[in-house]
DNA sequence: GCAGCCGAGATTGTAGACAATCATGTTGAT
DNA sequence: ATCAACATGATTGTCTACAATCTCGGCTGC
């Protein structure tokens, strides 16, 4: 999630795992054997262990005692709860951003949008995923709430996992248009309009998912069938 | 913070440390030597290590690489940011509670209030601290948002630390009256009234603090002077 | 007399090995 | 033939010892 590289080696592991999950190289329910990971990343098992512990509190992996770690499989209720939390937090965040619109803020928003467009242009999935989340984090930063920004970072990670798990169409075509709309509203200083645009954006993401049938919880079966490294 | 005892031994350590911090047995800036802690709790240093890592992400302790752990010393900006986050989240939480008032919910709220009163009656500081936070967590539970409840748990921990660090009067006389007011508003189904009562309650806590002078950051000096185990 | 440097002690960070636990496949009885 | 119990293999959880890093005291030189 960070824009640049990680600071400590354990963050590095977390980030690479996070990216692998967000890009769906690692499917929900996939087993994460400590020894394999330590071999892949060329680090000791202790490091892997710490990274997994951290990812567990982030809700990206599930740690079963004596049974190892798997990529988390959020239930439908959890998924809806995550979106509820995002609505709550981002609603307040954009409100704050609107009350303090500066030229620098607008410049950064536009620059970010431009990056997003470029990433879409060259079909760079990894960049698209990171930049889409980065837009929301940028808003949190501009709102000046460090804590809610950290919470939002976690929420975005979980959202990526949820999308990986429940998306119905292959390419949800979530281009930067909606982000652009939000930026326009911010620039106009229209608080309610910005809130509506953000709510619409989040609802769009949520509605693009298939949150109806009960759950595809097939941990065991799944990693037998889908044996892609 | 959990109402009952901890499940795993490492949670036990976290809880005891948390309580010690909230009760100000451990002052902000106090050093937390791994070896000492492992002796006190009669566990291996590895366990202590994991507990400290967990408390770090909760914001209760600060972990300096190769320099050990200390009880965190939130700055004034961080303190205000925490209260901002609480306003954001709890405002939404009470809204949801009001839209779904059941007799069971009211009964649980009243029962909790009674426990708080009893704890105040017998001047049980430890119980008061836990129950005061528990009231807010109960609201989160009644609101049915698991995720925001977890976030709020962390926010309450941090609030305890902030109170320990910045409180101006010795006993802030934050009795259960305000909680009772909130309950009354919920029972009346008055959403705006409940929001106002909650906002007032949080503002009361925040205003009772001394968030003016820059910061009493005296880590080194402090643990030389105050050498209470 | 004071500043800078160096070494001893202490504290954290890491790695490797061992013990405990769980899943799997086999064997035997009903 | 099916089910249950057991033994085996694999995986995680924990502990102990070692290495790296930092702090603090004393020492030397200016």
Image (cartoon, coloured by chain):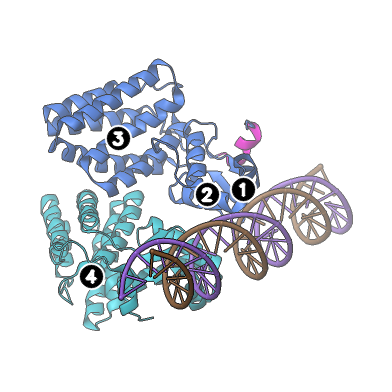
Chain colours: A blue, B cyan, C purple, D brown
Q: Are marks 4 and 1 in contact (CB under 8 Å)?
A: no
For the residues marked 4 and 2, what is the alpha-carbon distance in whole angstroms? Answer: 39 Å
Work out whether B146 lies above or below B176: above
Q: Earlier in the sequence, mark 1 or mark 3?
A: 1
Helix, strand, or loop for circle 2?
Answer: helix
> Which label lies toward us, 4 or 1?
1
Task: Name which residue lies at 41% across and 39% down.
Answer: A157
Work out which quarter of the rendered image holds the C terminus of chain B and state it: bottom left
Task: Name which residue lies at 24% across and 46% down.
Answer: A145
Q: Of all residues shown, which one is farthest toward the top?
A: A121
Residue at image mark 2:
A52
For the residues marked 3 and 2, what is the alpha-carbon distance in whole angstroms? Answer: 25 Å
Task: Name which residue lies at 56% across and 70% down.
Answer: B44
Same subunit under labels 1 and 3?
A: yes
The quadrant holding residue A228 is top right
Q: Numbered disc 4: what chain? A: B
Same subunit under labels 4 and 3?
A: no
Residue at image mark 3:
A136
For the residues marked 4 and 1, what is the alpha-carbon distance in whole angstroms? Answer: 46 Å
> Which label lies toward us, 4 or 3?
3
Residue at image mark 4:
B113
For the residues marked 4 and 3, what is the alpha-carbon distance in whole angstroms? Answer: 39 Å
Residue B205 at what x, y percent from top left?
16, 64
Q: Earlier in the sequence, mark 3 or mark 2?
A: 2
Q: Are marks 1 and 2 in contact (CB under 8 Å)?
A: yes
């Amino acid at each position: 999630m960070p824009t640049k590289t990680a600071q400590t080696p354990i963050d590095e592991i977390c980030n690479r795992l996070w990216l692998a999950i967000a890009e769906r190289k690692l499917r929900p329910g996939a087993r994460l054997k400590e020894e394999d990971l330590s071999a892949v990343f060329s680090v000791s098992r202790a490091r892997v262990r710490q990274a997994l512990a951290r990812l567990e509190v982030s809700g990206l992996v599930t740690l079963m005692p004596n049974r190892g770690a798997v990529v988390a499989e959020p239930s439908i209720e959890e998924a809806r709860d995550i979106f509820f939390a995002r609505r709550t937090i981002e609603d307040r965040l954009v409100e704050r951003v609107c009350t303090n619109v500066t030229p620098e803020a607008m410049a950064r928003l536009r620059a970010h949008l431009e990056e997003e467009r470029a990433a879409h242009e060259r079909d760079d999935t990894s960049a698209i995923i990171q930049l889409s989340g980065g837009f929301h984090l940028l808003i949190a930063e501009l709102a000046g709430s460090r804590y809610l920004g950290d919470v939002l970072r976690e929420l975005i990670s979980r959202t990526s996992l949820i999308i990986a798990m429940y998306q119905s169409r292959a390419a949800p075509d979530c281009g930067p248009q909606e982000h652009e709309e939000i930026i326009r509203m911010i620039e106009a200083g229209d608080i309610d309009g910005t809130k509506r645009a953000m709510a619409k954006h989040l609802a769009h993401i949520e509605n693009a998912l298939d949150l109806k049938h009960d759950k595809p919880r097939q941990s065991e079966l799944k990693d037998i069938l889908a044996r892609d490294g």
